[in-house]
Amino acid sequence: MKPSLAAKLLQVLAPWRSAPAWHIAFSGGLDSTVLLHLLADMANTETLPPLSAVHVHHGLQAAADAWPLHCKSLCDSLGVPLRVMHVHVQPGASLERAARDARYQAFAEVTGAGALLLTGQHRDDQAETLLFRLLRGAGVRGLAAMPVQRPLAGGHLVRPLLGVSRNELQAYAREHQLKWIEDPSNADSRFSRNYLRHRVFPVLTERWPQAVSSLARTAEHLSEAQGLLDELAQMDVLAADLPSPFPWLPLPSLALTSLRELSDARQRNALRHWLTPLTRLPDSDHWAGWRSLRDAKGDAQPLWRLADGELHRCAERIWWLPTAWSEFSDAPVSWPHPQNPLELPGNGRLEFIGAAPEGPLVIRYRQGGEIIEVPGRGRRDLKRLFNESALPGFIRGRLPLLYRGEQLLAVPTLAGLWRSSSDEWQLHWMPQTCDQGLS
């Protein structure tokens, strides 16, 4: 005997029965109407977290103005609180994507710590997603299509109906005499997904009746394959995550030597995993930038520009520099009260350890040709000292230099380049951290 729709739902949602709240993304369409009705009905016989519904009004068509009232009427009849959220859809090349982004931003606002946002995507949606992404040339992660669950804000987004067909949802709606909204835009074949749904899938299922379930099953296989790739990437990134020679520098970095030992495919797999929380990933053609950076001569300082920052190579290490890293001012900064820490615009903070030297003091940045007095070594060229210490090139222009008049008094001791010329004080620099917008 086949399990009922309610039994399938409970099985998927079993890990989250103790969540603080279940929020239902309620458009008023067939899928979310069935999901809402199922959960509200189950709440009468099962102990479930508090239920509520969220309706997002995109404001893209006049017909949608009546939908919140329909949603409220159904929610009231089921005893489920409803929150209507109005969003602004940013104009762009893809109206579908812009509307989705606005919708999920609203969902993130209501999903508190540990809470669930439940959406009504089903098996037919999964098959459409797989074919759509296949036609766009997606990789394994993209072809894994929609996961059953993923993190959202402080909680999780869960799609409990991914194993259920559209026909099953329609049968349930007819059995319980449910009414739902038919979005006119769903019939517009100018949208890619609608074209697949109305023009492509009927032809496929006429020749291959099991096409939808087969494609959905393929997405499950690819999801499992992606999980294995993620495990491999975690191992490879861990092996390359060796201690940095500059632990005071708060930037993500990896040892290139460990990555070089991997095949090209494993390198890309590891880097995708490492870069995913840092930037939007490049397409296949753009990965030539990684090879150029990796294979550059040892004395070169190559970089690979990505959507949200740059990957730099210094010696045998790669460093991730977010876009915010370049957004700092290199104008001189006076330090009239050196007994207090000095905030540097976009570049962290400076302070003295010990009694501060006599002023007036100014912080400047490298212009070239700087000379500094090094204890036991006399006057030394700053560039040569940087070269001796193998200080990464991208940090040299940001290193705050302490001047009194035209005399270069000190560079931060945090850099570990050489000891201070004074035993009475040290200049300590705390660079801008990731928490301040560097990732």
Image (spheres, rainbow, N blue to C red):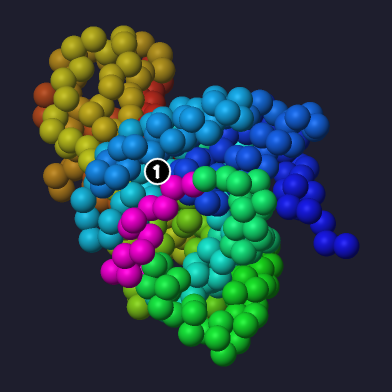
Q: Which residues are magenta?
A: 180-192
From this viewpoint, which residue is outermost toward the bottom?
207
Q: Residue at x 28, y 22 (%)?
A: 343
Return the x and y of residue 380 as percentages of the image width and height: 26, 44
In this rendering, is residue 45 above or below 31? above
Return the x and y of residue 257 as percentages of the image width and height: 54, 68
- Residue 421 occupies quadrant: top left
Quadrant the C terminus occupies? top left
Residue that carries the numbered disc 1 in the rendered image: 103
Q: Callout 1: helix, strand or loop?
A: helix
Q: Is residue 249 left or right of residue 370?
A: right
Return the x and y of residue 262 as percentages of the image width and height: 59, 75
- Camera-side residue: 307 or 240? 307
Decide whether residue 191 is among the magenta residues.
yes
**Is there any visible trace of residue 283 in the rendered image?**
no
- Camera-side residue: 403 or 221? 221
